[in-house]
Amino acid sequence: MSENEINLFIERNLTNFSVNSTGWNELIRKLLYEFALAGWNMEYRVFGKEKFGELRCYTYSEDEILNNKLKNIKDKYSKLSVKTCEICGSEGKMRAIGSWQTTLCLDHFLEQQPVIEIDDKQNIKRNNESVLNSKDIAKAEIEYDLQSLWLYTHHEESFYFSWQEPNYYLLLRSVPLSVFPEENQNEISAIFQDLRNCEICGYKAVHQRNCLRCHHEPWNDSGYFIQDYGEKSNYIKECQMDIFIDEDDYEKYFKHDRSFEKSPGHQILFTSEELSEYEKLLF
């Protein structure tokens, strides 16, 4: 087979892959090239798609030796795909956009994630586009331990918001209590009356046993904490280093969040040397 024949085979089959954008095109080209070298009959078409944020390729051969070669090639490029942005092809990782799994670089992840804003006219916006005005809310429903919010207008339109969006709690605070069911009103009001300072992230966001901002549990003298960390400063230090490393890009996304006040006098307990040692353990 000639190089030209392989290139024609690649271009013919590239469009048989149902993927979200062009970021994986180079991976698919390399996969098809390796198929050709492995002995795949280039007269046959090759199909694939994105599924759960991963590149999947569907082929079968009655030649067991060839089948094993193809499986190794498919596994190789599936693993590479979950490290490659589907949109631009740069380094990425598996992320959740709403209920969908997708593989994106940080920039394209941030572009697609909604950010709630409320302007001085009480317009509720997502990514700078107006969704509704607070005056138009006729009914509100709260679900899943106050982590999901449905807003309904007088025109029977409905809008869904989640704690996973920056400024969710700012929105929850701004919705009139009177539009919630009576059994939820005291519960919602209690959140914002009872907030305490978080020694880990430095925001006034601790409600009951968790911080609503960084999601860490405040230190207590239970056996679990003592056994694993010895003393309070060790626990706070490790949690702060996790936030700083920001492996899941949570802090980069939530830089837009204005739901909670900064705590006065908050202290960072780790040193740069301790952070370096901690990173070595993680990576």
Image (cartoon, rainbow, N blue to C red):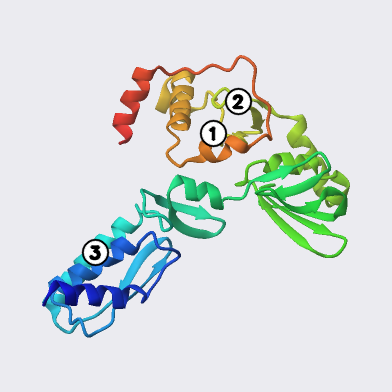
Whole-percent x, y for residue 19 in the image: 42, 68
Mark 3 surroundings within 10 Å by alpha-carbon count, few (fewer than 14), some (14 through 19), many (20 or more) = some
Q: Is tag 3's residue or tag 2's residue first in the polypeptide sequence? A: 3
Of residues 64 and 29, which is closer to you in this image? 29
**Residue at image coords 58%, 38%:** 254
Q: Which residue is mark 1?
A: 216
**Residue at image coords 60%, 35%:** 213
Q: Is tag 3's residue or tag 1's residue first in the polypeptide sequence? A: 3
Of residues 265 and 49, which is closer to you in this image? 49
How many labels were placed on the picture?
Answer: 3
Q: Which residue is mark 3?
A: 30
- Asked whether the beta carbons under mark 2 and mark 1 sit within 8 Å of each other, the answer is yes
| Amino acid type at image mark 1 | His
Q: Which residue is mark 2?
A: 198
- Give the vertical position of 168 relative to 99 (above or below): above
- What's the distance in space between the residues labelled 2 and 1, CA to CA? 9 Å
Whole-percent x, y for residue 275 in the image: 37, 24
- Asked whether the beta carbons under mark 3 and mark 2 sit within 8 Å of each other, the answer is no
| Amino acid type at image mark 3 | Lys
Element assignment for label 1: loop
- What's the distance in space between the residues labelled 3 and 1, CA to CA? 43 Å
- Give the vertical position of 183 relative to 52 (above or below): above
**Residue at image coords 64%, 46%:** 115
